[in-house]
Amino acid sequence: MTDQDCAAREQQFEAVECQHGGYWRHDFIDHAYLYNLYFPPERFFKQLISQIHELVLNYPVAQNVLAGLVGTLINQPPERIVVGNGAAELIKIVSGHLAKKLIIPVPSFNEYANAAPPENVIEFALDAPSFQLDVDKFAAEAIRCQVDVAVVVSPNNPTSLLVPKADLIRLLDKLAAHDCMLIVDESFIDFARDRDEETLEGDIIKYSNLAIFKSMSKAYGICGLRIGYMLTANAQFAVQVRQGLHIWNLNGFAETFLVHAPEYQEEFLASCDQVRADRDQFYLDLCDIGGLMVYRPDANYIFCRLPDHAPSGSKVARKLFVEHNIYIKHCQGKTMPESDRYIRIASRTQAENRIVTEALGAIVNSKTIS
């Protein structure tokens, strides 16, 4: 690679780091964004094409119909469901407008804190190196700070670690007496080994202080359609969130996906099985890199601590992009100790995972650090 080519790649890397999407336009291998590569099936795209004129020329349905469509998919009554333009829209409503004081473990998905006024956010530091959530300490801090909304992302982003269901139920019980809603973000739960045993969806009616948030972009591989939902048995909370929505907050393409999604359930479950298989092999391969601490993942991405002799996370990410056309996420700037030592790598196909493993191993154990 010439100096000119290298400089152009460096410039492209810096531009991509400032973006929040549109990666497909840049022709690199995306090990940063976290979505299911094996879904939706091709026949869904054919359905969209066959209806393209109607979808572009007509108004989509509104919230009551959307809630019914999601309810059919997840076997829940529509009155418990609020459908958002991605989970991000719902997060903005709750963090930015409803929560008086919010607590969230860190590191975690930044948007819950970013969407809230800074003075309204309490960050609860997860202890390194385990980054496991101690729900008893978390509850005690939430009660001490008199928060009205607590957030737990499970599996967590970037750590890919699940909070056991039994722990979340204990947390719900502790917070219930203090008028505190618990939001459990289950956007990656479909990739967990025991998904049906770990999700709280089946327990929603038991806890009036529980709301489950889910971005459908991740498991269903539909990032561009922007669909997320909230599930809660707290009717008052659901009404408050609905009041923050626009009348037509989803477009016809998203509506069409929800209409047909139940038809694809068998393919969806098979796709999640394939994601788990790829992810588990990726984990084993990464464990072979000397000095790399690899956290056993529950989601479709893997959290790693780089050895002290290796370049920083940001340098590793830059080198992978410039020299190998691979983009990963580094954790520098995350609220965590030694954030520059950590990286997060999305699992893709087994062939692509082998390529990034080989490149990462060469960089980590290189004698020259630039």
Image: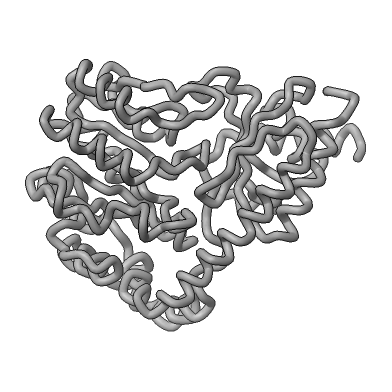
Residue nearer the viewer, 68 or 45: 68
Residue 97 position, x and y percent, is 20, 33
Does 162 sit above or below residue 354? above
Q: Residue at x 52, y 37 (%)?
A: 159
Does 156 sit above or below residue 280? above
Q: Residue at x 32, y 39 (%)?
A: 167
Residue 368 image-quadrant placement = top right
Residue 231 position, x and y percent, is 23, 53
Q: Residue at x 57, y 47 (%)?
A: 301
Residue 322 position, x and y percent, is 78, 38
**Residue 12 at least partly seen:** yes
Residue nearer the viewer, 94 or 343: 343
Please say which color scheme the image uses.
one colour
Report the label total: 0
Does 339 sit above or below residue 84? above
Residue 345 position, x and y percent, is 63, 43
Does 67 sit above or below residue 298? below
Residue nearer the viewer, 321 or 280: 280
**Residue 16 at least partly seen:** no
Residue 178 image-quadrant placement = top left
Q: Is residue 235 left or right of residue 115?
A: left
